[in-house]
Amino acid sequence: MNLIYLISLFIGTVQLLFWLSTYFLRKGIKESETYGATALEPLTVILSARNEAHNLSTFLPHILSQDYPNFEIIVINDDSTDHSSEVLDHFMAQYANLRVIHMQNKDREGKKQALQEGIKEAKYEWLVFTDADCYPKSDQWLRSLAAKCNDKTDIILSYSPYQKGKGYLNDFIRYETFMTAVIYGTFTQLGMPYMGVGRNMAYRKSRFLEKVNKEKFEEISFGDDDIAVNAMANSQNTALQFTEKAIVMSLPKATLPDFIKQKTRHISSSAYYKTNHQWLLSLLAISQAIFYPFLFFLIVHDIQAAISLFIFRMAIFLPNLILLMRKMECKDLIHKAILMDFLFFLYYWYVSFQWIRTKKISWI
């Protein structure tokens, strides 16, 4: 019974500390709504696209039409075989601030080599990153990110939820993305930034060139966003911008195998995080992964303890979760919160097994 007590104490303590800490994320979101820079830095927006002609036609205008005084857009046409070149030529004829780099016959898989080329060619110090299958929710996207630019900041992390669709797969993809943002957002607010999402973040060109080893960065096909942030970020130089105007929407994967493949690759990136980040994230993941199996064990052996543990976790989990869902494009999932939490537990186990089983993760 002492072991049961210790496991209950571990789960309760880790979950309590984390969900109470999300207060600082909510506080950061609220403060960002009234935060403004005195001057708007010139920006370079960089995106890599491979066979994305349709998405470029649909979403690139959302970036080109941003209400911002001085920015350029660099699109790296990454060895495309569709009519991406024609689409980009069409836009270049209309927008003088659009530049295109055509890459062919790369010697490495993934998009890191393409992004490196974009970074090298960027005219401005501040670089903003997104993907071809994404679109800013507002024409104030760049202004919202630039509001966080100051002398002390090198990195700005933002939020990129997936577009709402039909079915439970879409619900869970959106929930998982929301939870990932809650975790890295909370850690950032606590002074421990460890990752960002390449669909919506910004950093200084000089910081990247100083801190990220080119050969080491390119030798791993995945992790262009989180591995780079983990190398560059510290408690003093990273800002969070999760306000509604800063949001970039993304197109979700359409099938479960595609989603699992994508997330397995992302989890593989965590092996390259700083050691303290790996330990803290592991503790949080373990407390989530063992909660439901341990709860089922208690139901069989000590129903009163099971009820107490369930009520305790839900009492700290649900109120904080609901407050964040209301701020982060997930209000429609509130009534499914416990179901999503249970699926999140299954997801942890399945993706972890997939990661162990898969020796080589191919780039999507």
Image (tube, rainbow, N blue to C red):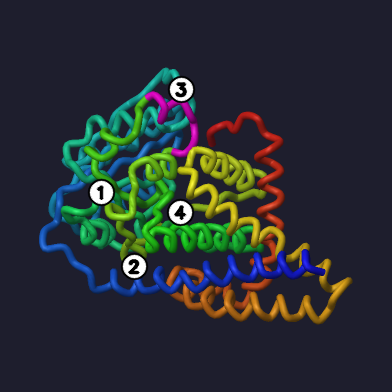
Q: Residue at x 35, y 29 (%)?
A: 213
Which residue is tagged 3?
108
User: Is 153 a magenta residue?
Assistant: no
Q: Which secondary structure lies at badge 2? A: loop
Q: Is residue 55 at all visible to an observer of this figure?
A: no
N-terminal-most mark, 3 or 2: 3
N-terminal-most mark, 3 or 4: 3
Vertical position of residue 354 compared to residue 172: above or below: above
Question: Type of residue at label 1?
Answer: Asp
Asked whether disc 4 touches disc 2, contact meaning CB atoms under 8 Å apart, the reply is: no
Frontmost residue, 334 versus 28: 28
Which residue is tagged 1?
154
Q: Which secondary structure lies at badge 4? A: strand
Q: CA–CA distance between discs 3 and 2? A: 36 Å
Q: Residue furthest front?
A: 2
Which residue is tagged 4?
250
Residue 64, disc = none
Magenta stretch?
215-223
In the picture, measured across the screen, residue 16 lies left or right of residue 211, that is right
**Residue 2 locus on image (x, y percent):** 78, 68
Which residue is tagged 2?
243
Which quadrant is home to the C terminus?
top right
Frontmost residue, 325 versus 255: 325
Q: Residue at x 44, y 44 (%)?
A: 226
Q: CA–CA distance between discs 1 and 2? A: 19 Å
Q: Residue at x 32, y 62 (%)?
A: 241
Foreground disc of the pair 4, 2:
2
Frontmost residue, 136 versus 151: 151
Frontmost residue, 12 versus 124: 12
**Residue 234 locus on image (x, y percent):** 33, 50
Within-10-Å neighbours for mark 2: few <14, some 14–19, many 20+: many
